[in-house]
Amino acid sequence: MSEVQERSEDPVYQNHIDGQPCAGAEGRQFKAVNPSTGRPWGSFVESGAADVDAAVHAARRALDGPWGRLSPTRRGRLMMAWGDKIAAHAETIARLESTQNGKLIGEMLAQARVVCDWLYYFGGLADKIEGRTIPLERRSVLNYTLREPLGVVGVIVPWNSPTFLTLMSCAPALAAGNTIVLKPSEVTSASAFELVRLAEAAGFPPGVINVVTGARAAGEALVDHPMVAKICFTGSDGAGRAIAARAGARLASCTLELGGKSPNIVFEDAPVDNAVAGILSGIFAAAGQTCIAGSRAYVHERIYDQVMERLVTRARAIRIGDPLAAGTQMGPAASAAQLHKNETMVARALEHGAALACGGERAKVPGFEGGYFYQPTILHRIPEGNPILQEEVFGPVLAITPFSSDDEAVALANGTRFGLAAGVWTSNFARAHTMARRLQAGTVWINTYRALAFNSPFGGYKDSGLGRVNGIESIDQFLQTKSVWCETSDEIQDPFVMKV
Ligand code: NAD
């Protein structure tokens, strides 16, 4: 890795600007922590406004220079070559990710292997961005549109799936011809350097993708920079709101991929085994640290007891441990702060009258005593208005509630400010598609859960976000349209009358 200055147990990374490792202007650093051991892992630049400014200028130079001069076809080919490189280095990336965020090596490997599909798909779209000719009333004018990149895009990502989420933002932005300044999460900064190294090895000109590390202040400097045309943010709704306000103050646009409180609704005619597996994967995979976590389950009263019993039995049997070891089913929370959040939100749910069906404590993992492990937790008998039904935990905490009619299920499922995703479990197709229309969520899964694809749009209703990533329309969010008017007649027009 070009940014690693010394090969030791505790690597030191620098920013990556204009194709070069770059020390921070203020000389400040921060340390990341391995969540499986609680020990420090790697030092990174605590970037300030001067570092962000250098990265944005590099991105602008690349846009006005080699990247802007590339044909869309060549641009797309470079993206595809980058995809090949990432696929070939998937194991290195997955190991870095797992060490940083404690997610299972198998899950990180699957993500690192599949992200090339995003680059193949959006690379293929780069030369299919077309304008239109407009049939004006004024026949003497040729009017056509050009679809142009916005400029420098600031990409800010969270820690839970760093490579995957970085590519979901960067692929459409690059296909549209923009250049990037990436600010990874302070919890998981290292894999961004591997990604940019591979991009440049694939032939990307320096400056097309720049990486500045740091926490909130570095993100704020990027959002505030007057040369950043757009922010593509993935993270919590609180940060998304703050970013949208700052960007709005200088009229920069935002795509916001935010959090959720997604429901799984299980009807009495559901394939119960599949529904139980879907609920378990929705909330306990990745220790619940996914934006699409199915953190609420609504189960028809006729099958409630049997679903509950199976969920509790299987939750208790989940193998918690070293995320790098084969056979582990759940790793630690990604940080001490996240572990603390799990604990305080479960305590608050209990104070507000919920009952604990299983879990609710830290998990002990021999050999990993300093790690941030938390038990798979199921809360039930939850009074209406309990905060656990409204607020995102981002941990392995399921809130389960019975319902008795379709209308009640819809009202309960839609009764939060979020709207990222929802799962519907039924063997009745009319009911399934009616539910799909009635649920306020950007993604509805019927008899499946936690599935994404590069070509299917993804994003939130309500407080879960603005705009979409993935799918053909996501590219529109990184383009602006220019209307070109060309008079073909020599006739001299009246200068005091508007031409329509
Ligand atoms: P976070 O909002 O705390 O941080 C996300 C990123 O934003 C980090 O890089 C952080 O440094 C930066 N940041 C934080 N505050 C900022 C500010 N005011 N200005 C600029 N930058 C700022 O989120 P997190 O804890 O890293 O991630 C968990 C959250 O991300 C959850 O809410 C989860 O649901 C959400 N998420 C959403 C999606 C999606 O696609 N919708 C995907 C994954 C995670």
Image: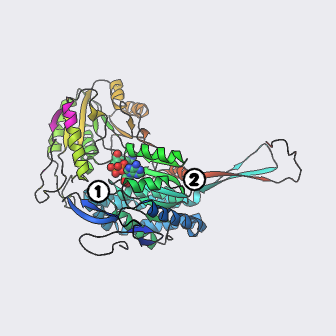
| Picture residue at 21% right of the left edge, 38% below the top | 346
Report the side of 174 relative to 290 (left or right).
Answer: right
Q: In this view, does 250 lie to the left or right of 23?
A: right
Residue that lies at the very extreme toward the right in this rendered image: 491
Q: Where is residue 212 in the image (x, y as percent from the top left)?
A: 41, 62
Model colouring:
rainbow
Left or right of residue 93, residue 246 in this image: right
Q: Nearer the viewer, residue 227 or 386?
A: 227
**Range covered by the magenta-colored residues:** 347-364
What amino acid type should be assigned to the residue bearing mark 2?
Leu
Q: Quadrant of the C terminus?
A: top right
At mark 2, the secondary structure is: strand
Residue 154, label in figure: none
Which mark sits nearer the N-terminus, 1 or 2? 1
Name the residue beneath numbered marker 2: 479
The answer to whether residue 156 is above or below residue 279 is below
The relative height of residue 498 versus residue 475 in the rendered view (above or below) is above
Judge left or right: residue 52 versus residue 251.
left
Q: What amino acid is found at the position of numbered circle 1 in the picture? A: Glu
Any mark on residue 107, and which? 1
Return the residue found at the far bottom: 6
Mark 1: give few (<14), some (14-19) or many (20+) Cα within 10 Å. some
State which quarter of the image contains the N terminus: bottom left
Give residue 207's position: percent from left, percent from top.
Answer: 50, 68
Residue 317 belongs to magenta span: no
Q: Distance between the residues labelled 1 and 2?
A: 33 Å
